Image: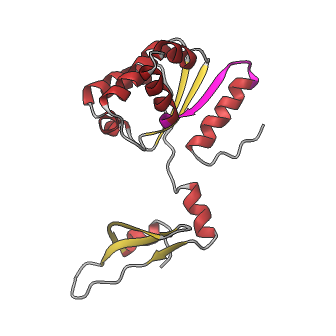
Amino acid sequence: MKLHIRGKTHLSVALGVKALEAGHTVLFLTLESMITRLTRARMGNRVERQLIQFVSPKVLIIDEMGYLPMNREEAGLFFRLLTRRYEKASTIITSNKSFVDWGEIFNDQVLATAILDRLLHHCTTLNIKGESYRLKEKRRAGLFVSVLPRRRRKEKTRTMRPKTMYYKTAEKWTFYSGEKWTKQRRLRSGWPG
């Protein structure tokens, strides 16, 4: 089977499909939906039942870890889930954050360390680098415009102003600004100009 993998979610779904083909049970959730279910279950005194539902699949895929921070209670529920799955079933997590930044996600560095300790004990980590697939498609469609920086006058180095980009969505233009770019770095990175 030839896979055309384009990002973290695509890769995790492809692994889930392979696990299903091998006869395993798979559950795919975003972190937000999983935390919402656990929080609602806690309010209705059904946490134990909900945790059993999340622990029972052979493969649990948790997508979009790190996009939204968790409060202490949500982080505790997530920790309870991972503790129950630890060394019993496979867990796939996609994240846009490095492990160093997970303390910000859980708002507790000690809890983040405990979670990472369980996750990284028997794991394979894939680091996907490169341009976002969605932004690449927007650029091809002409919706992503790059505004090149102007040269500063009276400088001996060829330092440019910060790279400025605009990303056009259906409703508005969103502004992005990066660090100082030298002409050489700008050319190496593949940006036009």
- Asked whether, in this view, residue 105 is left or right of residue 157, the answer is right
Q: Residue furthest front?
A: 44
What residue do we see at 57% from left, 25% from top? 60
User: Quadrant of the rendered structure where residue 1 is?
Assistant: top right
Q: Quadrant of residue 143?
A: bottom right
**Residue 150 at what x, y percent from top left?**
35, 83
Whole-percent x, y for residue 158 in the image? 30, 78
Judge by depth and name the residue closer to the eye, 171 or 128: 171
Residue at image position (43%, 20%) is 42
Observer able to see residue 44: yes
Q: Left or right: where does residue 158 sit relative to residue 39?
A: left
Instruction: In the rendered view, tell whether residue 129 sits above or below residue 138.
Output: above
Q: Quadrant of residue 140?
A: bottom right
- Seen in the image, is 141 located left or right of residue 159? right
Can see residue 82? no
Q: Looking at the image, how many numbered discs can be counted on the residues? A: 0
Residue at position x 72%, y 24% in the image:
20
Bounds of the magenta span?
21-32
